Amino acid sequence: MKSILDQDAFNEIRDRVNRLEENSERQWGKMSPAQMAKHCQYPLRIMLGHDHYNLKPNWLVNLLFKKSMYNDKLWRKNLPTVKRFKQLEEANFSKEISKLQTLIDEIGAERNKESWGDHPAFGKMTNEQWGKMQYKHLDHHLRQFGL
């Protein structure tokens, strides 16, 4: 699995995000491009330490889901979304895509950081796990719009 912390994968993701348009047609799911851009900000904000959630790492969640967050297997279409990250209201595409690009750039600028800290649901994560998880999530949603 690629990692957003690797320069080539970072450039690829950044280019794909830049190609997303307000009228990009979704291949599956319910989110519009604007809603997807807003949805994708949440995990990046967690990684960057901008958002803190009072979740305790759960052994069952870790056992069942943690490895799927960063392994090489693509996520299937129409996976359920964490309630907190669901986007039910329409969003402003220009505003949300700009915020997403800014967060991606912030991660790129800090990619050599020694530690990204703990995940609120998965607990301890290595930089490799963080980078792969973020790449995988963004890749999943960009594929959702044919990118």
Image (cartoon, rainbow, N blue to C red):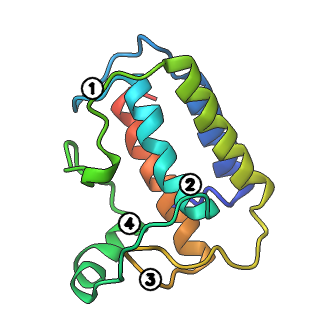
Q: Earlier in the sequence, mark 3 or mark 4?
A: 4
Q: Which mark is residue 57?
A: none
- Provide the residue designation for mark 1: 27
- Provide the residue designation for mark 4: 69
Q: Earlier in the sequence, mark 4 or mark 2?
A: 2
- Please name the amino acid that badge 2 sits on: Arg
- Please name the amino acid that badge 1 sits on: Gln
- Residue 17, given in percent of the width and then of the height, sits at 57, 31
What is the CA distance from the residue labelled 3 to the residue labelled 4? 13 Å
Q: Which mark is residue 123?
A: 3
Callouts 4 and 2 close, C-beta under 8 Å: no
Q: Secondary structure at mark 4?
A: helix
> In the displayed image of the protein, which residue is found farthest to the top?
23
What is the CA distance from the residue labelled 4 to the residue labelled 1? 21 Å
> Residue 70, located in which quarter of the rendered image?
bottom left
Classify residue 136 as left or right of residue 78: right
Q: Is residue 133 above or below residue 7?
A: below
Q: Is residue 32 above or below residue 15?
A: above
What is the CA distance from the residue labelled 3 to the residue labelled 1? 33 Å
Classify residue 59 as left or right of residue 9: left
Of tags 1 and 2, the one toward the viewer is 2
Q: Residue at x 61, y 58 (%)?
A: 50
- Provide the residue designation for mark 2: 45
Callouts 3 and 4 close, C-beta under 8 Å: no
Q: Secondary structure at mark 1?
A: loop
Classify residue 38 as left or right of residue 58: right
